Amino acid sequence: MGAIFSVALLGCSLVSDSGRTQCRRDEDCASNQQSRFACESGLCVERESSGIFDCAGVDPVEANVSVSVRAQGFPVATPVAGATVLLCGNLDPDCANPMETFTADDMGLTQPVQISATDPLPFHFRALRPEQTVPTLEFTSTRVIADAASADRPLLIDVTSPGDVEPLASALGVELLDGRGHLVIDSEPCPGIDSLDADMSGIAFEVDNATEETTVLYFTSTNLPSSSLTATQRNGSALIANVAPGLVSVTGTLVSTSTEVVRVSLIVMPDAVTFAVALP
């Protein structure tokens, strides 16, 4: 199993050397936290700053849409038939009074939900398989919702459990502890910048209630977590294991400038997985 998920780094130098190949992919340039270097023609080259986190004067994304939800598994994105999907207010951490409740059909699809909001969203989704008692939490963003609606496709909500995530972590020597929660964090650039083209590399995540057991694993370009990386790659994603339950703030700092660039507040439940989008 370890061979499937491990990443073999080539240990390239970040000093130009035209006489030899330094790298084959961006991850090979990620030594010494320098993940804002890219692999170009076999050499590690520093990327130019794109200003994708400078949102001054940028209007927030607004969503006033009707969109269906598709419940899908993680890490294998197959439809979850019969999933229960809840829309919960962030001020109702136990979701004692859900704003909406849906049941997914055989394709994992729910009836459309009407959403009118701007970031940061005042609500989140929770989803459970028919046999589950502990939900998966999803703190998405207005952009993700608006993009789904404009493309006439469903909003994707993950349904998983620590048992599903455990092989990804254990292959890297990380044990998922009972009673802790686990996070999957994505990053987004400022509104007006195409999130598919934006380079979200070089971000180091921290949680405000981290303990000795809390571990951050950054995803490679092939969307597998790595224990060798010290900051995000272009996809801007990370798995944060063993987070104490409660209301938690996750911050992302750009390593090259030591500047906080993204943040998200979320709820961590024991023995559950929370997905979230960190915003500038």
Image: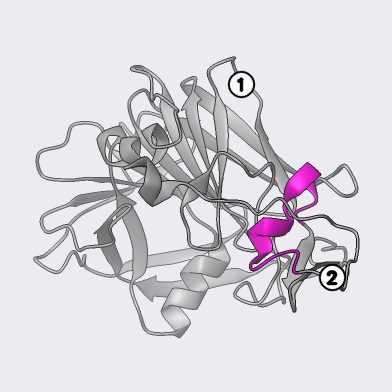
* Along the line of sight, the residue nearer the viewer: 113 or 226: 226
Magenta-highlighted residues: 21-35
Residue 245 visible in the snapshot = yes
Residue lying at the far bottom in this picture: please name it: 151
**Residue corresponding to mark 2:** 50
Point 26% across, 59% down: residue: 72
Residue 147 left/right relative to 28: left
**Residue corresponding to mark 1:** 210
Q: Quadrant of the C terminus?
A: bottom right
Magenta stretch holds residue 49: no
Q: Quadrant of the N terminus?
A: top left
Point 56% across, 38% down: residue: 227
Residue 61 pos. (x, y %): 64, 69
Specify the color scheme. one colour
Residue 75 pos. (x, y %): 33, 53
Against 204, residue 64 (above or below) is: below
Q: Quadrant of residue 193?
A: bottom right
